[in-house]
Amino acid sequence: MARIRFYLDLPAETYRQYYQGQANMVQVQALDGQNLRFPAAILRPYLSHTGVSGLFELEFDENQRFISLQRLSTA
């Protein structure tokens, strides 16, 4: 099991493109410099009227399969 942290500041207008199916994967750079790609759908619990933002921790298994996503702070 591995965990990677990243900051995300995704405005609502941008997230709408994911919701409408124009894009389905989000790409971010982790705090350790790794590039991450994951399905936009896992961000839905954190979506507000302003978008999705904060410090997140993505957890995945040894086969790189998604386990969980937690928001650690809203900064």
Image (cartoon, grey):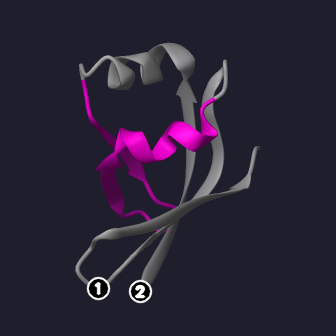
Measured along the vertical axis of the image, is residue 20 above or below residue 30? Answer: above
Measured along the vertical axis of the image, is residue 53 above or below residue 68? Answer: above
- The percent coordinates of residue 50 (x first, y second) are 66, 20
- The percent coordinates of residue 26 (x first, y second) are 35, 41
Residue at point 36%, 64% (across, down)? 34
Question: Observer-nearest residue: 35 or 23?
Answer: 23
Residue at point 42%, 63% (across, down)? 33
Q: Which region is colored magenta?
A: 23-47
Query: Image quarter for residue 41?
Result: top left
Amino acid type assigned to the residue bearing label 1 in the image: Glu
- Is residue 39 one of those drawn in magenta? yes
Disc 1 marks which residue? 62
Residue at point 27%, 73% (across, down)? 64
Amino acid type assigned to the residue bearing label 2 in the image: Met
Q: Residues within 10 Å of mark 1 (few under 14, many from 20)?
A: few
Position of residue 44 in the picture relative to residue 51 (left or right): left
Measured along the vertical axis of the image, is residue 42 above or below residue 52? Answer: below
Q: Earlier in the sequence, mark 1 or mark 2?
A: 2
Q: Distance from label 1 to label 2 (Cα)?
A: 6 Å
Measured along the vertical axis of the image, is residue 12 above or below residue 8? Answer: above
Q: Secondary structure at mark 1?
A: loop
Residue ranking furthest to the front: 45
Mark identifier at residue 1: 2
- The percent coordinates of residue 20 (x first, y second) are 32, 17
Residue at point 44%, 47% (across, down)? 42
Is mark 1 in CB contact (under 8 Å) with mark 2? yes
Query: Image quarter for residue 5?
Result: bottom right
